[in-house]
Amino acid sequence: MKSKKNVFLVGALLLLPLLLEAGPRLYIKIKPPARKVIVIKPARPHRNAIWIGGRWHWNGKAYLWKKGYWTHPRKGFVWVPGHWNHNRHGWRWIDGHWKRV
């Protein structure tokens, strides 16, 4: 009986990342505006700073611009910017993330 519980536990732990990623997805029928062209202010705060660009955010009624910001780089990682993805359901935001190099 104990081995069945262990098999179930291991299976649940292996599926957990898939279940967390499979949450509800918000699709928006209205195309997001074009990316804003901006002058980055303030200037780079330190030599290695990474700029995380601004983006259009859907608030349930309209798109609002969220400003970008400077951040510290993560050793061994590169920043992959977020983007809007379109399919038959509508538009969906894919978050930016740090990717191991």
Image (spheres, rainbow, N blue to C red):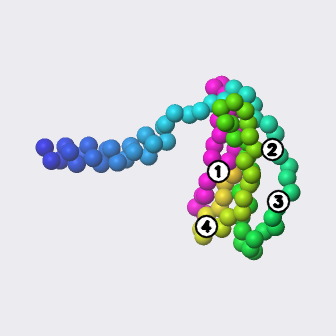
* Residue 2 percent location from the top left of the image: 15, 47
Give the overall secondary structure of the magenta segment.
strand
Q: Residues within 10 Å of mark 1 (few under 14, many from 20)?
A: few
Q: Amino acid at mark 4?
A: Arg
The residue to which callout 2 is attached is: 35
**Could you tell me which residue is drawn at 74 percent across and 51 percent down?**
67
CB contact under 8 Å: marks 4 and 1: no
**Could you tell me which residue is drawn at 72 percent across and 48 percent down?**
66
Front position in the image: 6 or 42:
42
Q: Earlier in the sequence, mark 2 or mark 4?
A: 2
Q: Earlier in the sequence, mark 4 or mark 1?
A: 4
Alpha carbons under labels 4 and 1: distance apart: 14 Å
Alpha carbons under labels 2 and 1: distance apart: 15 Å
* Residue 10 percent location from the top left of the image: 30, 48
Q: Earlier in the sequence, mark 3 or mark 2?
A: 2
Residue 12 found in image quarter: top left
Q: Residues within 10 Å of mark 2 (few under 14, many from 20)?
A: few
Alpha carbons under labels 3 and 2: distance apart: 14 Å
Q: Which residues are magenta?
A: 82-101
Q: Earlier in the sequence, mark 2 or mark 1?
A: 2
The residue to which callout 1 is attached is: 96
Q: Earlier in the sequence, mark 3 or mark 4?
A: 3
**Residue 74 circle label:** 4
Q: Is residue 9 left or right of residue 51?
A: left
